[in-house]
Amino acid sequence: MTGAGSPTWDEPWRRKLVDNVEILVKQLWAVGVQDIFLDGSFVEDKDHPNDIDGYFDPHLSMMNPNDMLRFQQIVSSLNNLDPHKIWDWNPHSRKQVHGFGKKQLPMWIFYRVELYPHLNQGTGIKDQQGNDLKFPSAFRQSRHNFTPKGIIKVIP
C-alpha cells in the first residue's frame, strides 16, 4: 500500500514541502503572478517525494522584447523578496547536491521546490514522439509512461 494512510507516508516531510512552496507562492503573489500550478511526485501517491515541481504563468512571451523586460523586472522583484535570491533558472547556477545525481537550482537547494516560468517556451520534457512540450502539456502526462494526469492550481 502506498499513499496517504500507508505506514511509510511521510506526513512531516510533506508538510515541510508545503510550508516551503507557500513561501515561494506568496512571493509570486506579491509581484502580481496569480497562476501557479504544482505537479510531480508530490501531487501523486509517492510516500516521500523528493520535492515539489511546478510552474507559474506571468502571461508573457519570450518572443516579445517588452514581455522579456517585464519578466526580468518580475524576477528582480522576486529576488528582492527572497533572502536567498533563488529566482534563477540559469544552468550555471545549478550546484551538485550530495546524494542526488543531477545538479540542482538554488530554489531546490533552499526550498526543495522547483517552479519554472511559463513563457511560451519548451520545457525539456518530451512527448511519446520525442517532441519538446510546453507548459501545461508537459505536466499533464506522466514522464515515465506518458499517461494523462492532473495538476494542482494554487488558489489565492
Image (cartoon, rainbow, N blue to C red):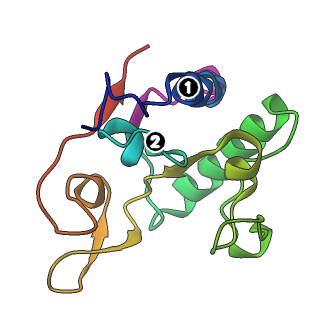
Q: Is residue 62 above or below residue 50?
A: below
Q: Quadrant of residue 143?
A: bottom left
Sequence-wise first label, 1 or 2: 1
Q: Quadrant of residue 75?
A: top right
Q: Nearer the viewer, mark 1 or mark 2?
A: 2
Looking at the rendered image, the quarter that the N terminus falls into is: top left
Residue at the spot x=39%, y=28% of the render? Answer: 7
The amino acid on which the numbered mark 2 sits, given as a three-letter code, is Phe
What x and y, as percent, mark residue 72? 68, 52
The amino acid on which the numbered mark 1 sits, given as a three-letter code, is Gly
Q: CA distance from mark 1 to mark 2?
A: 11 Å
Is 51 within the magenta?
no
Is 28 within the magenta?
yes
Q: Which residue is mark 2?
A: 56
Question: Would you say 81 lies left or right of 4 here?
Answer: right
Q: Secondary structure at mark 2?
A: strand
* Bounds of the magenta segment: 27-37
Question: Would you say 147 lies left or right of 27 here?
Answer: left
Q: Nearer the viewer, residue 41 or 81?
A: 41
Which numbered disc covers residue 32? 1
